[in-house]
């Protein structure tokens, strides 16, 4: 009898870049490193690939003809729970911040060392696996008229309308719902939402909190639910109930 456990399936990567001279050798290199790589030469082709299969991570060029990488990334973080690493020739800090603000997990500036990219990919995959909160079995969270269903990852307002949230916003909201009326500083939020290996910075946490506030606050400039605790961090100022999920 063979008790050897089956080898885990390789992580599946979608590599999106319009430059074949970079994309094809990089795809071959990543395959040799043990990843299952699917290539796309445009955002339109990437959307088609994403409809056909589920990926563990997307490597995404920013500057492409037609729809650019920033637009595709917005779609990914809103509609799919998949990490994104930008491959960009833009080295300016503002471009990196924009990418992080819209939900990218990391970025690599061209030209880059392929071994560094592999290290970043493995780091983001570890972080995503560790940081994703386990759904609460048959329970939803209710707070101030809002309802979050962790099994379906759906946020529903008081009128019953579904409000789209990105995977990062979902993990951030879960952190607050699991620790209501507790002050969570930026370091702890990074631990809970992105993982300790994150290449992010305090300002990125602030930006993600601002994005979440725009979804759930009546007036995001005068936040009442997610309050800023000066010198401390943030706190969900609401009572949270766990209720059974109705079939």
Image (spheres, rainbow, N blue to C red):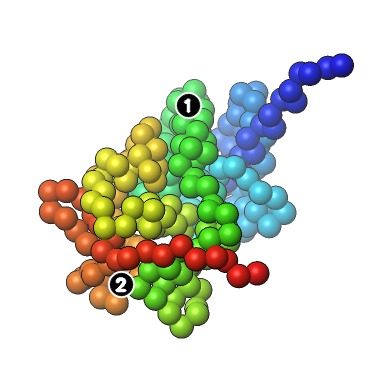
Image position, residue 113 (x, y; %):
45, 25
For disc 1, the marked residue is 119
Number of the front mark, 2 or 1: 2
Residue 203 visible, this orientation: no
> Image height check: is 127 above or below 217?
above
Q: Residues within 10 Å of mark 2 (few under 14, many from 20)?
A: some
Image position, residue 239 (x, y; %):
32, 65
For disc 2, the marked residue is 217
For the point 47% across and 54% down, which residue is it?
167
- The reply, left or right, for residue 161 in relation to residue 174 is right
Image quarter of the N terminus = top right
- Say which label, 2 or 1, has the lower sequence index: 1
> Image height check: is 186 above or below 21?
below
Tell which of 242 and 107 is nearer to you: 242
For the point 69% across and 32% down, which residue is it?
9
Q: Secondary structure at mark 2?
A: loop
- The reply, left or right, for residue 75 in relation to residue 37 is left
For the point 44% across and 57% down, which residue is it?
170
Image position, residue 224 (x, y; %):
23, 70
Image quarter of the C terminus = bottom right
Marker disc for residue 25: none
**Residue extending furthest top?**
1
Per the model, the C-alpha gap separating discs 2 and 1 is: 38 Å
Tell which of 55 and 193 is nearer to you: 193
């Amino acid at each position: 009898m063979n008790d050897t456990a089956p080898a885990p399936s390789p992580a599946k990567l979608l590599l999106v870049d319009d430059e074949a001279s970079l994309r094809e050798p990089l795809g071959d290199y990543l395959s040799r490193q043990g990843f299952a790589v699917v290539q796309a030469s445009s955002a339109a082709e990437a959307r088609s690939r994403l409809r056909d299969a589920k990926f563990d991570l997307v490597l995404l060029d920013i500057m492409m003809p037609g729809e650019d990488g920033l637009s595709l990334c917005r779609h990914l973080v809103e509609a799919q729970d998949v990490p994104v690493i930008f491959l960009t020739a833009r080295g300016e800090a503002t471009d990196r911040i924009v990418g992080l603000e819209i939900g990218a997990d990391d970025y690599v500036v061209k030209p880059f060392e392929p071994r560094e990219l592999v290290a970043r990919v493995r780091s983001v995959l570890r972080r995503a696996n560790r940081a994703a909160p386990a759904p609460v079995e048959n329970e939803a969270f209710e707070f101030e008229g809002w309802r979050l269903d962790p099994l379906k990852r759906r946020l529903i307002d008081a009128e019953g309308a579904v409000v789209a949230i990105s995977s990062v916003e979902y993990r951030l909201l879960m952190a607050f719902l699991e620790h209501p009326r507790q002050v969570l500083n930026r370091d702890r939020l990074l631990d809970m939402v992105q993982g300790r290996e994150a290449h992010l910075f305090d300002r990125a946490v602030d930006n993600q909190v601002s994005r979440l506030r725009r979804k759930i606050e009546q007036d995001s400039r005068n936040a009442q639910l997610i309050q800023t605790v000066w010198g401390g961090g943030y706190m969900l100022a609401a009572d949270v109930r766990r209720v059974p999920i109705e079939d």
